[in-house]
Every structure is written in C-alpha cells, then in structure tokens.
Amino acid sequence: QSVLTQPPSMSATPGQRVTISCSGSYSNIGSNTVTWYQQVPGTTPKLLIYTNNQRPSGVPDRFSGSKFGTSASLAITGLQSEDEADYYCAAYDDSLNGAVVFGGGTKVTVL
Amino acid sequence: HVQLVQSGAEMAKPGASVKVSCKTSGYNFITYGISWVRQAPGHGLEWMGWFSTYNLRAKYPHRLQDRVTLTIDASTTTGYMELRNLTSGDTAVYYCARTDSSGSWWFDPWGQGTLVTVSS
C-alpha cells in the first residue's frame, strides 16, 4: 500500500491529453513539493518534473505538473508513442522522522 | 556529464548481507546527497534512505532503519548501501541517485541499477 495514491493505469490515443493524479496528505504533498518520474519498461527511472511544476532541461514541454492542497497531477498533452511508460509521483513526508514516499505508479498505454 | 555507475548483480542467501556500490562522477560530490531506491520485480519504487555527503548524516525509512546502512568514500566519490538479514522479499533492483537535499528531494540522475537476488 503506497502512501501516495495514483490510478494503476490509463490509456489514450496519440495526440490526446492524459492527466495522472497523485493524492496524499498534509504531511507529504500538503507540506512539501512533488516530483514526477518516468520509467520506460526495462529502463532506469528518469526525472520528469521537480518542485511541483519545473521541467529539467531536455524534458518536452508537453509534460506539466501542478499541485493543489494535498493532491498533485501530471499532464501529458499531445501524447506520443514514446510516452508509453510508468509514471511515479513522490514527495517528502514529515511524519515518522521523515521519508521520501512514492505513489504506486501509473502505467500509461498509448493505443 | 553526471554519471552514477553501480556494482554488478548479486546473489545472496537468506540471512546474509549485501553491499552495493555507486561510483559518481561529473559533479561536485559534496553538493548533493545520494539516495537509494529499490524496485521489486513487477512493483513500484521504494525509498531506502539518503546520505548527506556534506555533513555525513543519514536518513532511513522507519521500516528499514534496523537493516540498512548507507556510507560514502569521499576520496573515491562513491556511495555504498548495505542491507542485512536478507529475505526473499528483498529481491529487487537497487538504484542509487544523486539527490537534491535542499528541500525539493529530487533524484537525478539514477544509476543503472543492481539486481539483488535472495534465494536459498
């Protein structure tokens, strides 16, 4: 059972918009910033979004992040076939002496 | 070019210990911490801890704090993760990652991963 809650899977056709939700609590998302990672099957996780909505250099601008209260979301606009991957949200949690917690991951399938 | 290169796959028996290394290069070693994350087969990501290369402080998740120890060798800019008293539930790919510890707690980049298999 992950501390942060994500939908297990989502699917869409190329060109469509996909929005992945990440639900937490006051001690994690409510008090700290959110990070998103992309993991293409068989590869290492890659930083996608940090500090809620910042993109590292090299990440396409079709990826965007937002946070409101104890929830966050990752939007992918103009979905492309190479976006088929697992997406994880993460945040620092102030409870239990502090820890980084992850969502369970959302598998995005491009139909 | 920032790189984290991990040691090779390991096989261990239940009750044993394993130590994985993470050789870093391409950045100022003491400016960023090193975190460790594992991924069991077919499962999601689990944070295993963080080590500050600046003040040599470590932080561990409550459920693993009695079995995991993170260390570094600053002279070789290498981080280490030791996990003790292994069970089959510890079979996973273990990743190290450069970590921003100023408040954002992002991990970038990640090492290539080290598969640890626990089996009798």
Image: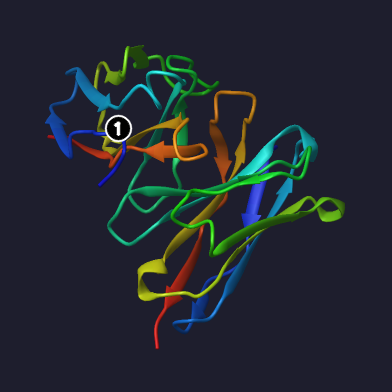
User: Which residue is found at the position 26% from the left and 26% from the top?
Assistant: A23
Image vertical order of residue B42 relative to residue A55, above or below = below
Q: Is residue A110 visible?
A: no
Image vertical order of residue B53 relative to residue B86, above or below = above
Expressed as whole percent of the image width and height from the top left, the position of residue A42 reads 37, 54
Pick out the residue farthest to the right. Answer: B75
Q: Nearer the viewer, residue A84 or A34?
A: A34
Query: Which residue is denoted by mark 1 in the rendering?
Result: A83
Image vertical order of residue B94 relative to residue B35, above or below = below
In the rendered structure, which amino acid carries the disc numbered 1? Asp
* Occupied quadrant, residue A80: top left
* Occupied quadrant, residue B51: top right
* Occupied quadrant, residue B87: bottom left
Q: Nearer the viewer, residue A107 or B81?
A: B81
Expressed as whole percent of the image width and height from the top left, the position of residue B114 reads 52, 63
Q: Is residue B63 visible?
A: yes
Expressed as whole percent of the image width and height from the top left, the position of residue A52 reads 43, 17
Q: Chain of mark 1?
A: A
Question: Is residue A44 rendered to the left or right of residue B69?
Answer: left
User: Which residue is found at the position 28% from the left and 42% from the top?
Assistant: A104
